Image: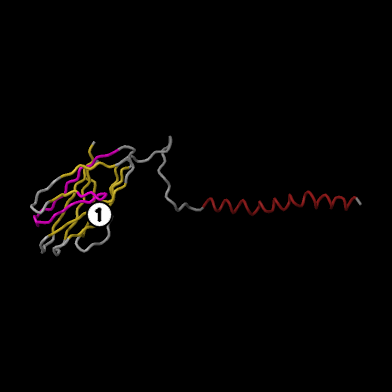
Amino acid sequence: MKNSNIKKIFATILEPIAFGLLALLFIIPSITVVNLEPLTKKLKDLDVLGVSEKAELEIEIVGGSHQIFSREKIKEEEEGIFSYTTTITRRDSDRYSKPILVIKNNRNQESKIEVYGHTNLPTKSDISLIIDDQVYRLESPSGDVTSHKILLAPNGEYTVFLAIESFSDVQFNEDFELEIRELE
C-alpha cells in the first residue's frame, strides 16, 4: 500500500517535472545555436549615446549600360563637391536620356546644390539634367554653359537623368563632366 502510494505521487507530481527538465535539456542548446548564427541583415550604424543618422548629402551612381553613355564615374573631389564623368559616344541625331545619379538628402532640413556640366568640344548638342520632371539645361546647342541651383527637400531622394539632344549626327566621342557642389 505504501509502495503504490509512492508510485502514485511520483506519477502525478515528479513525472511532469522530469519531462519538463528533459525538454529543457534539448530546447536550451537549440536556442543557443540559433543565437550564435551570424546576422545576414545590415545593421544600422548606432551611436553609443543614442541613435544617430548620417546627416549628409549622398550621391550614388545608377550605372547600367546605354547605347551612347559609357565609362561613368563619380568621385568626391572635396567635402561637398562631387564630380561625375561619362563618355558620350558617337550618335545619330535624336534625343537620348539615362538615369545617372541618385541624390539623397539625409538631413532634416532643406539642402541646396549647384550643378554645372559641360563637354570639352562643341557638338551643337542640347545637354540637360532632369530632376523630378524639371529640366535644367546645362549646355545649349550654341555652346553656352549654365549652372543651376537646386533645392532638395528634407530626407528627399531624387533620381537624376542626363538628357542629350542632337539635331545632326555626331561622328566622334566626347567627354562630359558634371560638377555637383553642396551649398551652405
Q: Residue furthest right?
A: 1
Q: Position of residue 17 (x, y in %)?
A: 73, 49
- Is 153 magenta? The answer is no
Choose top left, top right, bottom left or bottom right for residue 99.
bottom left
Q: Main secondary structure of the magenta part?
A: strand
| 111 is within the stretch colored magenta | yes
31 or 62, which lies in front? 62
* Total numbered labels placed on residues in the image: 1
- The answer to whether residue 103 is left or right of residue 10 is left
- Does 65 sit left or right of 25 as displayed? left
Whole-percent x and y of residue 124? 9, 56
- Residue in view at x 52 percent, y 51 percent: 36
Residue range in magenta is: 110-135
* Quarter of the C terminus within the rendering: top left
Instruction: Decide which of 137, 17 is in the foreground and name it.
Output: 137
The percent coordinates of residue 111 (x first, y second) are: 27, 39
Bin the neighbour count of mark 1 within 10 Å (Cα to Cα): few under 14, some 14-19, many 20 and up: many
Going by the numbered disc 1, the residue's amino acid type is Ile
**Residue that protrudes farthest toward the front in the picture:** 133
Q: Quadrant of residue 30?
A: bottom right
Which residue does the numbered mark 1 point to in the structure image?
Answer: 100
Horizontal and vertical percent for residue 61? 27, 53
Where disc 1 sits, the SS reads strand
Q: How is the image coloured?
A: secondary structure
Q: Residue at x 80, y 51 (%)?
A: 12
